[in-house]
């Protein structure tokens, strides 16, 4: 579910979203939930830029291709989401671990890394960057 106080398709004010899901199938099982919001969200070409953004989420999965468990709480001054780059500047207490046939990731109290066939990234409690290969 997504909504905002005002949106013209490119810019949104007081933007928020919430999600939750669970599934069990022959490939494995997963469960996740999250909420996010930002004071303003702007779309520039293929990138979303958020100002005054907060996120909280938790998730777990296990299956034939790997396993993950983790939780995240972030309060970002600014964040950028693009298909090839994700970057943020703010406070982060994410903690989790995962391994799969294509990547590995580990984070404790916001300090972490991820690496795999699709890219790599590093995170600190005050910022992160992730680069994706396509």
Image (spheres, helix red, strand yellow):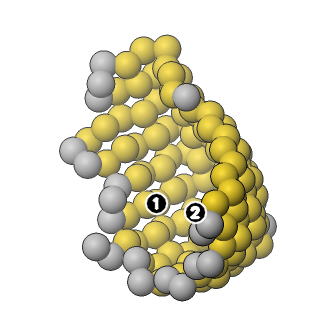
Looking at this view, name the residue that lies furthest to the top: 5
Residue 83, image x and y in percent?
A: 33, 59
Residue 47, image x and y in percent?
A: 31, 48
The front one of 31 and 37 is 31
Residue 66 in view here:
yes
Q: Quadrant of residue 53?
A: top right
Q: Quadrant of residue 112?
A: bottom right
Left or right, 119 with reference to 25? left
Q: Secondary structure at mark 1?
A: strand
Cβ atoms under marks 2 and 1 closer than 8 Å = yes
* Mark 2–mark 1 distance (CA, rounded to whole Å): 7 Å
The front one of 103 and 95 is 103
The residue that mark 2 highlights is: 127
Q: Secondary structure at mark 2?
A: strand
Q: Is residue 70 above or below residue 16?
A: below
Left or right, 12 with reference to 125? left
- Quadrant the N terminus occupies: top right
The residue that mark 1 highlights is: 87
Q: Is residue 75 above or below residue 113?
A: above
Left or right, 14 with reference to 69? left
């Amino acid at each position: 579910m997504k909504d905002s106080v005002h949106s013209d398709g490119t810019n949104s004010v007081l933007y928020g979203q919430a999600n939750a899901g669970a599934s069990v199938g022959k490939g494995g099982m997963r469960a996740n939930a999250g909420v996010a919001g930002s004071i303003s969200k702007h779309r520039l070409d293929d990138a979303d830029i958020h100002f005054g953004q907060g996120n909280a989420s938790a998730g777990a999965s296990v299956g034939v291709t790997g396993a993950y468990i983790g939780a995240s709480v972030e309060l970002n001054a600014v964040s950028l989401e693009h298909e090839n780059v994700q970057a943020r500047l703010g406070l982060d207490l994410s903690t989790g671990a995962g391994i799969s046939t294509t990547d590995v990731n580990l984070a404790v109290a916001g300090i972490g890394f991820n690496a795999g066939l699709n890219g790599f990234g590093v995170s600190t409690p005050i910022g992160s960057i992730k680069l994706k290969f396509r």
